[in-house]
Every structure is written in structure tokens, then in C-alpha cells.
Amino acid sequence: MAPTHTKKRLSVKTVMGLLIVLSLAVFSIFAFFYHRHLLLQETAQIQNHATVISTSLWSYEPLAPMEYMTLAVKANRYEQATIFDEQDQIFLHIDGDPYTWIETLFLTLGLFHTYQHKEPIIFNGTTIGHIDIQWLCRVIYQYMYILFCLLLFLTGIWLFLTLLDAKALLEQRVLARTAKLEMEVRERKKAEEKLRLQAQHLSMHVQNTPLAVIEWSSDFKIVEWNKAAESIFGFPRDEALGKTPYELLLPSEEKEGIQKLWGKLSNQARGIRSINTNLTKNKEIKTCEWFNTPLLNSNGEVSGVASLVLDITDRIKAEQANKVLQEQLLQSQKMEAIGNLAGGISHDFNNLLQGISGYTQLLLGNWDPKSKDYSRLQGILQACERATDLIKQLLTLSRKVESTLGPLDLNERVTQIRAILDHTIPKMIDIKIDLAPKLYTINADPVQIEQIILNMAINAHQAMPDGGKLSITTANTHLDAAFCAKHLKATQGPNVMLKVVDTGIGMDQATLERVFEPFFTTKEVGQGTGLGLSTVYGIIQSHGAYIECLSSSGKGTEFTIYFPAIAHQQELLEKPTEKDFELGKNETVLIVDDEDIVREIGAEILSVHGYATLIAESGEEGIRIYSENKDKIDIVIMDLNMPGMGGFNSIRELKTLDPNVCILVASGYIPTDTVKQATELGADGFISKPFQIRNLLKKIRETLTISRQTKK
């Protein structure tokens, strides 16, 4: 920091004080000696007057000194001059000029002093009188002049010293200010460099950020356009600058809304977020999220708008795809819930149906086919079969029962179903079949494929009460990753497409969203179960396939199914010919079931067809009976869902008693995981209740044959 001015001023005062003291001392000495000199000079002059008067004038004329003395008084500015004779009488008296007002003032102030001197007048050695002179010592004028000159001199010195001090101070201040300015310049350069770097970084960030940065002037023209904007919209910077959005980015339906948005931005200081559809240079439609902020000038007026733009086209598509996936997941959960419900009731329901069906089959064997009661019994048996199919549909749609999959030519299956449709679909509906040549082989259950096509054909028939056109098409196709990402159950790679299209009344959006929902139907009460398309959906899931439905009111419905093709196309296996079943050969069968009606009907059926039977109502009783008769029991027919130790523990105990025991599992509900677990425990075969007598006898014979061959 620069030295303070106070120290320099103190130094000047000290010097000036010393000079003043020295000057006053010199002046006092000078005044003392000068005053004495004046007095001596004045005394000598008066002596000369006395001499002149005595020698020159006195001898000639007594009044002669008059002129001389008058001149002397005037010349020397005496107050008065008096000449006395030898008798001391006034010989001549002359008064000087009166005092001026300054002299009067100085006399009053005591600055002037009056002096008086007598000098004898001697003529020829004799004193003839004396001269008395009174004068006013005006030496103060010289002193004042000297003091004034001294004051000027001291003032000059003070000014000189002050100027030196000021010069030194100014130099110090200049040096300090120069240093400060240099520091400020350095700081400003640093700030400018920092601002330059920040501007450079900001420019680089603006140009390289994934967000499009667009700046608009007050007249809605583009003044900034970064690389992301070029990437999103396809317009180069040079092509975009100076253009309005109406010329580049906006489809016609967006222009009115953007005009309103610009009006709001031009009249407020806060930003606005909006989502708009925009055009690219290639006329592609993109969905973009805009963050618009008004830019204000120094007067607080809107001078333009800065926009950050995010391309959310993929996100919107992903959200839409996610919505579809959620709907598919919800559908799967509904199927799962229905499957759990079906699994809970199927066992008991099938046991009841087994009793009704079994007794009905026994009665039909003893009844005259021509009687009315015979046809009535057949009606009962058909009702049991329909009830059984209903339970199977419930289990199938939720994939609680595994499909019997194998290599299948879909064209062949569609051709076979065409013959069925010709007899079931009214003639006013035109059925068109378009089958692609060299169709890929798929892995499918032929019965369930037939069920899919028939269900969709029946729905199409019901959607065309006044006639129409039903098209069934097959084709080879390839599903890419993008398609599979949007469709949860689709399998990437080669697929076989099955498309069923009708020209019926179609469905609105609300109906379309629930088309695969279990028990949902648009038919009147009593005219539909709402399980047809739900069953189709369940079968599609069990085949690892994907189904989609397109429809709108009055424009028909289109179902498209994609079945994954077998990777290496296989030759279709020839179907084995069905052999007649054999009756029993007095083998002993142990029936273990907790339902009385199942035990009784089973024992009666087997007894009639050549088998001896033992019955047990629980697993514990079955183990006891088997341990007592294991040498004569050939096969055990066992239910799995029983109280007590249950079916699985019973199988374990039987295998412990006899590792070669032959076990046929018969249950009203056999999900896939249950079948697998029973197989691992040693079960040799499975049959679902309710069963036909023919199927039961055939299954017993097959199980015994396989067991005897594997356990020799």
C-alpha cells in the first residue's frame, strides 16, 4: 500500500517551523542592529543639520535656516524641528506633514515610535543654541516589507516542499495505482480467460449435448441450432438458421397449438414444458419433449426463447410396448387365477363325473339300444363328456395340463379341419383357405390346434349372422428382435403364421382389451361360457406361441398366431394304428381312493371285465392291504389327492414294500408338475378322471405290459 500523506505533511511542517524560527531569529538580530544603525544615522544627520545651520546659514541671516530646515523636515519626514537660541528661546519652529491614516493607525497600534534628539549649534567654537528634532521612526515599513518578503520566501519554500511532498505522494499513489491496475488487469484477464473458457465449454456442451438446443429470436426465427438438433430433426445448422418452425418442424395439426404457446412465452418470464409431434427433414414424425424458457433483456422484456428438446419417440413407443406387455402379463395372471380355481375344483368335480359316467356306461351295456331310455342314457353320458371338456378347457387355458407336443404339419391339420367346418359353418359364410407351400414344421398338439381353429371359426360364425367371409391363411415368416421386444411371448427367428380373418361386426376397443379374459362374453346369458378364446390363449401359451388380435367395430376381426418353427425340420412320424384293448386275465387290482362312488364303480367295471378287485379308502389302508396280498396284487390304481398320508407318501411306502409294484395313478386333476413328481417316485402310468371304460381297460393293460417288460 502507498504511504499515507500525513507523515509527509508532518515533515514539511517541521521544516517550515525551523525556517520560521531561524528567520525570526535572523530578523530580530537584523532589526536590533538595523534600528541602532538608523538611530546613529539619524543622530549623525541631525549633527550635520546643526553644523550646516551654524556654519553656513547662521552667520549670514538668522532666517536663512528656514528654507534648509523646511527642506530637511520634508526630506526626512520629521514631525517637527525647533531651533533654540542661546537663551533657549525658540528661534525657528517647523512642523512636518500631518500623519497619514495608516501612520495614525500604526501609532494607535503602537507600531510607530517617536524619537527626539537635541544637538548643540556651535559657531566659531561657541554654542549659539541648539536644534531639537522629533521624528517618527518609520522603520516598521522596512520590517514589514522584509517580513512580507520573508513570508513570500517561506511561502515559496512551503509550496516547494509541499509540491515535493505531493510529487512523492503522487508518485507513490501512481505506483500503487499502477500496481493495482496491473493486478486488476491480471484479474480481468483471468476473468476474461475464465469467461472465454466457460463460453467455450458452454458452446462445446451446447453443441455436443444429447439434448437439442434451439434458440429463437423475438420474431420466432432460429438463431441457434446445435448438433443434437441436427441429429434429431435432420436439418443442418446452416439450413435451419433464420427459419421459423412452421417452415421446418411442425405438421399442420400442431401449428395452431404452437402459435398459442409462443404467445404465452412472449408475455411471461417463466418457462413452459410441452410435448409435441415434429417433422424431420425426411418427413418422419417424432415425438419430442420441449423445455422452453423466455430470454429477458436488461429492461426485463422478452428478447427470445431458449428451448431444450428431448426426442422421446422411443420412450413413447417403449411405454406403449410396456403397456401391451402389462396387459399380456395381466392376462397371464388371470389365466393363472382361473387355473388355480380349476385345479381346486377339478378333482372333486371329476370324481363326481366319474360316478355318473361309469354307471351310465354300465347301464348302456345292459340296455336295449332301440329303447328310449338308451338314448337318454347316451344324453347323460354326452353331458358328462361336455362337463369333462369344460374342466379340461379351464386347465388348458392356464397351462395346468401339459400339451402333447410333436412335429406337426399345420397345412395338413387345417385341411382336415376344413371338412369339419364345411359341416358346421352355414353355407352363407364363404370359407377361403390359403395355405403356403413348403410350410415349416411346428411342435404342436394336433388336438389342441384343432381346438384353436374351431374356436376361432365358431366365433367368426357368430360375428357374421347375416353371412360373410372367413379366411384361414398359413405362411412362413421370420420375427426379428424388435418385434419380439414389443410382443412378450413371441419367439425370435423362423415362425409359422396362422391367420384367421372374418368380415363380421368386429369389436370396439373396450371389448378388444378383454377378448382373452376368462368368462368374458358379449353373448346373452346362457348362450356362451366366455372360455372359447381364453382356451385358445392358454393353448397358445402352452405351445410357446404368440397371438394378437386386430379389430374395430363394423370392420371385422383378424387373429394372427405365430408358432415357432422346429429348428431342424423333421419328417412327420407315422401315427401308430390303434389296437383293440384286451380284457382282464383274472389279474388282481387294488383300488385306493377316498371317494366311495369311485371305488364302487371302479370295482364293478373291473369285475365285469375280467379283473379281481380289492378296495381301500385311504393310503394307510391301501398299504396294509398290499402288504397282506402283495403276491397276488398285479396293479395298484391310486388317487393322489387323499386325506391322511396322501398319494405321494403312499407310493413311497409301496415302493419300499415292493420295488416292483405296478402303480397306475388315477386322479381328477393331474397337473404337469404332479405327473413329474409321481414319475420320479415310481408311478408307471396315469389316467385322468372321469375316464371311459374302454380307456381304463386299455390303460391298465398298457401299464401292466410296460411294467412287466421293464421289471424283469
Image (cartoon, rainbow, N blue to C red):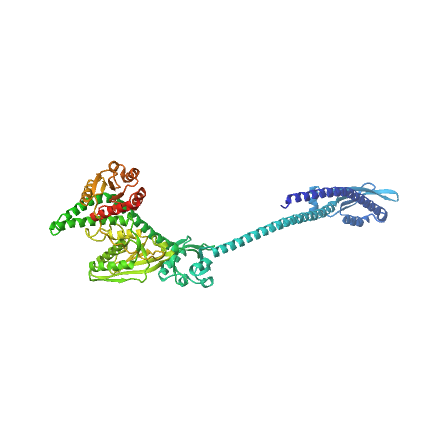
Q: Is residue 702 left or right of residue 55?
A: left
Residue 84 falls in which quadrant of the image? top right
Quadrant, the N terminus: top right
Q: Nearer the viewer, residue 160 or 39?
A: 160
Q: Nearer the viewer, residue 47 or 492?
A: 492
Is residue 515 in view? no
Quadrant, the C terminus: top left
Is 699 placed above or below 552 here? above
Q: Is residue 201 left or right of residue 480?
A: right
Where residue 668 appears, x then y in whole percent? 24, 44
Is 536 placed above or below 587 here? below
Residue 666 falls in which quadrant of the image? top left
Q: Nearer the viewer, residue 374 or 274?
A: 374
Where residue 115 appears, x then y in whole percent? 76, 42
Outermost residue toward the right in this view? 124
Outermost residue toward the front in this view? 712
Residue depicted at x 20% and y 40%: 596
Q: Nearer the viewer, residue 692 or 388?
A: 692
Is 218 placed above or below 52 here? below
Is residue 255 in view? yes
Residue 282 falls in which quadrant of the image? bottom left
Where residue 526 appears, x then y in whole percent? 19, 51
Q: How many marks?
A: 0
Q: Is residue 664 left or right of residue 264?
A: left
Where residue 647 appears, x then y in whole percent? 27, 40
